[in-house]
Amino acid sequence: MASLRVCAITFDWYPFDVLVRRTAEAAASAGYGSDVICIRQPGQKAEEICDGVHVYRLPMSRGFGRSLPFTILEWTIFMIRAGIKVAQLHRKQKYDIIHVHNMPDFLVFAALIPKLMGAKVILEIQDVSPELMAAKAGGRLRKIILPLATWQEHFSARF
């Protein structure tokens, strides 16, 4: 029987995010092909194997304390880059499972091409996006952001 191939996508650093690291390492230690697509900190290699996990780091930084529009722009750029990367990798080595870690929830759409080609997609919801986005927006924007963020969470989970 052929081994499963799993790819995790996260808008975080690897191996910094403990949940991503542990699930990827568990897959690798079970004999599955385990890849991670993530962002790259200064000084990190663009590609390497860490404890049996093949890590692909995209050239992006992650800012803290930035405005909500800028944060959403960062997330969107990463989603597009991660979508391109996972599609390229999927063409070479078919993935059985794409495991997407939020935030943002809509990062799950990076897995569109593998899903259309038969891969199963898991959206790991660790944080409640609507409430966090609404809190970050604050003021009058909160009334607009909360329903929009709730809609994107629902739509992402349905995907």
Image (tube, rainbow, N blue to C red):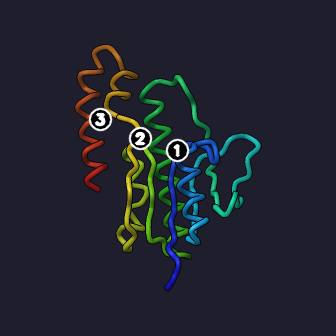
State how many labels appear: 3
Residue 122 percent coordinates (x, y): 38, 57
Residue at x 55% of width, y 68% of height:
89
Q: Amino acid at mark 3?
A: Ala
The crowd level at tag 3 (other Cα within 10 Å; few <14, some 14-19, many 20+) is many
Residue at x 36% of width, y 35% of height:
129
Q: Are marks 3 and 1 in contact (CB under 8 Å)?
A: no
Q: Earlier in the sequence, mark 2 or mark 1?
A: 1
80 or 5, which lies in front?
A: 5
Q: Are marks 2 and 3 in contact (CB under 8 Å)?
A: no
The crowd level at tag 1 (other Cα within 10 Å; few <14, some 14-19, many 20+) is many
Residue at x 40% of width, y 36% of height:
127
18 or 58, which lies in front?
A: 18
What label does residue 126 carry, if any? 2
Q: Amino acid at mark 2?
A: Gln
What label does residue 11 carry, if any? 1
Left or right, 98 with reference to 12: left
Marks 2 and 1 sit apart, C-alpha to C-alpha, by: 13 Å
* Farthest-out residue, bottom: 1
Q: Earlier in the sequence, mark 3 or mark 1?
A: 1
The crowd level at tag 2 (other Cα within 10 Å; few <14, some 14-19, many 20+) is few
Which tag is nearer the camera, tag 2 or tag 3?
2
Marks 3 and 1 sit apart, C-alpha to C-alpha, by: 18 Å
Which tag is nearer the camera, tag 2 or tag 1?
2
Q: Which residue is mark 3?
A: 149
Mark 1 element type = strand
